[in-house]
Amino acid sequence: MKVIDLINNNNSGKPLFTFELLPPVKGHSIEKLYNSIDPLIEFNPAYINITYHQAEIMQVTQNDGSVINKLIRKRPGTVAIAAAIQNKYTIPVVSHLICGGTNKDETEDTLIDLNFLGVKNILALRGDSKRSAEFIPEKNGYSNASELVEQIVKMNNGEYLTKEIFDMIKTDFCIGVAGYPEIHKEALDMQSDLEFLKMKVEKGADYIVTQMFFDNKDYFNFVKACRDIGITVPIIPGIKPISAINDINLLEPTFKIHLPEELVSEVKKCKTNKEARVVGVEWAIMQSKELAEAGVPGLHYYTLGMSRNIKKIAKAIF
Ligand code: FAD
C-alpha cells in the first residue's frame, strides 16, 4: 500500500501512527530492530520508515599499528531491511534513498531492487556530506533531492537511464520528501527553501514529512507558508522525544532548530537521562495531542532506537 493512499483513505478520525528506524550497525542482528518494532505493533503503525546511511570516514587501525581514515558504511542494508520488515509484519515500509555517496546508475539499480522486493514507498533525500562541510555530489550523481525525485518519476513512467534495453516496466513508487519548519541548515532563507520544496513537489513528490521541531507554532507557520506558495500535498509532522540531557546541547546546532525555553529548563533540572526521557515523553505527548486536534494527516516519530519512549507516547495518543 502506498503512503499517499493510506493518508487519503484514513477515515479513523485520528492521524496515522508512523515511526522511523535506523538499520543496525554493521555486523549486528536484525533482531534488534524487530525488538524495537514489536512493542509498537499494538498501536497499528500505518507504515515504518527505514533510514539510509552512506559511507562515512572512520579511523581504522592497521596491522602495523598505524591509523588511517577509511570510508565505511556503518549501517548498510536499508533495502534488504525494508523488505524483511514488510514480509515479517505485512506493514508497508518507506525506504529512504539519498543522493549522497551514490551515482544515478547505482540509484537506478537500487530502485529496481526495491521494485522486485515489493517496496513501493520511497523517501527521496539529498543526504549530508560525510567528507566535507558542503554537500558534494558523486560523479554522475545528484546535487539535490529534486533530481532524485525526477529519476523516480521517470521510472514510474517506464523511462530508465539505460536506453539500450526495450519494454522496460513502469514502476509505481510513492514518493515522500523532507521539509524544514525552521528552514534547512544550508538554506539562504525561508522563501528560497520553500521554492525548492515546491520544486520537489512539482517534480512528483506525493507528500512531505518534516524535520523534528519542538514548538508546534513552527509546524503550523510552515504549513501555512507552504499553502501560501501553492504546495498542496499532505505535510506530516516529525516528532522526536528528548531522550538524553545532552540533547539540549546537541540538537540545536546539529539541525539548526530551536528548543523552547520551557523544555530546556525542565531538562536542565534532570539529574539522569532517565529523568530527561520522562520530560521528553511528556513534551512529545503534549505536542502530539495538539497536532492531532489540528487534524494533521499523520504523526511520525523519530525513534533512534528508543521504542520504549514511543510506546508511552503512542499509548497516550493512539
Ligand atoms: P534538498 O531538498 O536537496 O535540499 C538541500 C538544500 O539545498 C536546502 O538548503 C535547499 O534549500 C537547497 N536546494 C534544494 N534544491 C535546490 C536546487 N535546485 N538548487 C539549489 N539549492 C537547492 N539523511 C540521510 O542521510 N539518510 C536518511 O535516511 C535521512 N532521512 C531523513 C528523513 C527526514 C524526514 C528528514 C527531514 C531528513 C533526513 N535526512 C536523512 C537528512 C537529510 O538528508 C538532510 O537534511 C539533507 O541535508 C537535506 O536533504 P533534503 O532531501 O531535504 O535536500
Image (cartoon, rainbow, N blue to C red):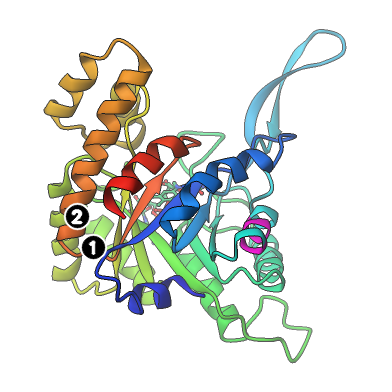
Tally the marks. Answer: 2
* Residue at the spot of label 2: 291
Membership of 83 in magenta stretch: yes
For badge 1, the amino acid type reads Val
Q: Quadrant of residue 29?
A: top right
Query: Would residue 246 appear left or right of 171 to someone viewing this image?
Result: left
- For the record, the magenta segment spans 82-87
Asked if residue 127 is positioned above or below residue 279 in the image, the reply reads below
Quadrant where the image shows the C terminus? bottom left
Q: Residue at x 37, y 28 (%)?
A: 243
Asked if residue 31 is positioned above or below residue 3 in the image, the reply reads above
As measured in the structure, the alpha-carbon distance from the residue carrying label 1 to the one carrying label 2 is 6 Å
Q: Quadrant of residue 249?
A: top left
What is the residue that sits farthest to the right in this orientation? Answer: 63
Q: Nearer the viewer, residue 131 or 167?
A: 167
Q: Answer few, some or many: residues within 10 Å of disc 2's Cα (few below 14, many 20 plus, some between 14 and 19).
A: many
Whether label 1 touches label 2, CB < 8 Å: yes
Determine whether the beta carbon of the residue marked 1 sits less than 8 angstroms from the nearest atom of ligand 1.
Answer: no
Q: Nearer the viewer, residue 289 or 166?
A: 289
- Residue 181 placement (x, y as % from top left): 23, 50
Asked if residue 52 is positioned above or below residue 252 in the image, the reply reads below
Q: Nearer the viewer, residue 104 or 175?
A: 175
